Image (cartoon, rainbow, N blue to C red):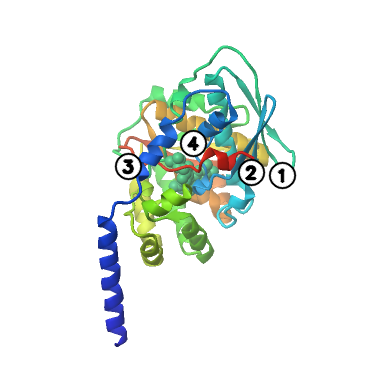
Amino acid sequence: MNRRNVLIGAGMAATGGAALWALSPGPDYDGLAASIRESLTPADDLQTLAGYATLAANSHNTQPWLFAQDGSAISIAPDFTRETPVVDANHHHVFASLGCAAENLALAAGAAGKPAAVAYSDRNEGGVMIDLGSSRTVRDPLFDAITKRQCTRSLYDGRAVETDDLASIEKAAALSGARVLIVTDPKKIEEVLEMVVAANTAQVEDPAFRAELKQWLRFSPRRAVEARDGLYSACSGNPTLPDWLGRLLFDFVFTAKGENDRYAAWIRSSAGLAIVVSDANDKPHWVEAGMACQRFALAATALGIRHAFINQPLEVPEKRLEFGRWLGDDSLSPDMILRFGHAEPMPWSLRRPVDEVIA
Ligand SMILES: Cc1cc2nc3c(=O)[nH]c(=O)nc-3n(C[C@H](O)[C@H](O)[C@H](O)COP(=O)(O)O)c2cc1C
């Protein structure tokens, strides 16, 4: 058999395999995603509080956290076995993810009659300490958004968000050391888009970035349900495929141009951008930025407004400097960039069983 016949044969086998795969009943991805959220009702035990906490946004859905309880104190420690050293060399995203989880946990504790005080802890390699008090139940409207929040990576409908809604979201996300800046000026949005495209190009063309990302991609519902972490294709609007085929095709279809075109359309369809900033570039502020970010996401969700991250300019060191200059205020450290607007929901992401994240 010559090389051409081998390739045709392999192509036919792949097509046949994919067709058979499409016909076979897969695992119930959507049922699992729904049950992870629907099984939760407010209670003050660690299992329940960690269940709400893990629904937080977290980088690459690595779920880099470990929860423990000692009396009325709950700690959230980083799980560095789940680090992503290429995209997050200094662990900024790990600590921001802990902040997102801490915010959910505090809201869930409040809803169960245990108002919580969150603080950065420098024990070991750093983490979060949450002290549970007791009072009457405080059910913050942000709490009800925890199970409804998702990153919606799709084309939005271009509609603006009401000024009053923007003001209330901004207020909800304002903490003492971190907050969000809302950008709705189309000229400024185009300037950020330019930086997203430049940084995205650098990332997509970096073999180490591609390899790390690929490790966290879940192309099939079967693989997604097995792992219950990482980035499932359907959540980003990509077709689902047998895992082996997805891994094979990724090397050919994941191109800078393809991704940049998609991001340009996504950003231009959004109502605006939210830039999470904090007062210093250190672990305590990364955690606080995560809390502000999660509060932004929950406040937006509560108003029916969707969001997705477009963090690329902050993940490439030279671009981060450029973004800082664009921000024009040396006293602010940029932590996360998101877009927001109106869109239909996308499939929900999964989480590992809570038992696996309780130390
Ligand atoms: C610090 C941080 C950085 C993130 N960066 C990106 C990003 O650059 N691009 C993206 O699409 N999502 C990003 N995300 C979102 C996560 O991928 C998302 O939260 C995770 O996959 C879980 O999905 P969910 O938020 O829909 O539950 C980031 C989240 C955090 C907390």
Q: On the image, numbered disc 4 is attached to which residue?
A: 55
Establish if 133 lies above or below 273. Answer: above
**SS type, badge 1:** loop
Q: Is residue 179 visible?
A: no
Question: Which of pointers 1 and 4 lies earlier in the amino acid sequence?
Answer: 4
Q: Is mark 4 within 8 Å of ligand 1?
A: yes
Q: On the image, numbered disc 1 is attached to which residue?
A: 125
**SS type, badge 2:** strand
Given contact means CB atoms under 8 Å apart, are the residues at marks 2 and 3 in contact?
no
Q: Amino acid at mark 4?
A: Leu
x%, y% of residue 6?
30, 81
Question: Which of pointers 4 and 2 lies earlier in the amino acid sequence?
Answer: 4
The residue depicted at 59 percent of the width and 45 percent of the height is 94
The residue depicted at 41 percent of the width and 61 percent of the height is 256
Q: Quadrant of the N terminus?
A: bottom left
**SS type, badge 4:** loop
Q: Amino acid at mark 1?
A: Glu
The residue depicted at 36 percent of the width and 35 percent of the height is 341
Q: Nearer the viewer, mark 3 or mark 1?
A: 1
Q: Which label sits on residue 78? A: 2
Q: Is mark 2 within 8 Å of ligand 1?
A: no
**SS type, badge 3:** loop
Establish if 280 lies above or below 104. Answer: below
Q: Nearer the viewer, mark 2 or mark 3?
A: 2
Q: Nearer the viewer, mark 4 or mark 3?
A: 4
Could you tell me how far apart the alpha carbons at marks 3 and 1 are, in whole angstroms?
41 Å
Could you tell me how far apart the alpha carbons at marks 1 and 4 are, in whole angstroms?
23 Å
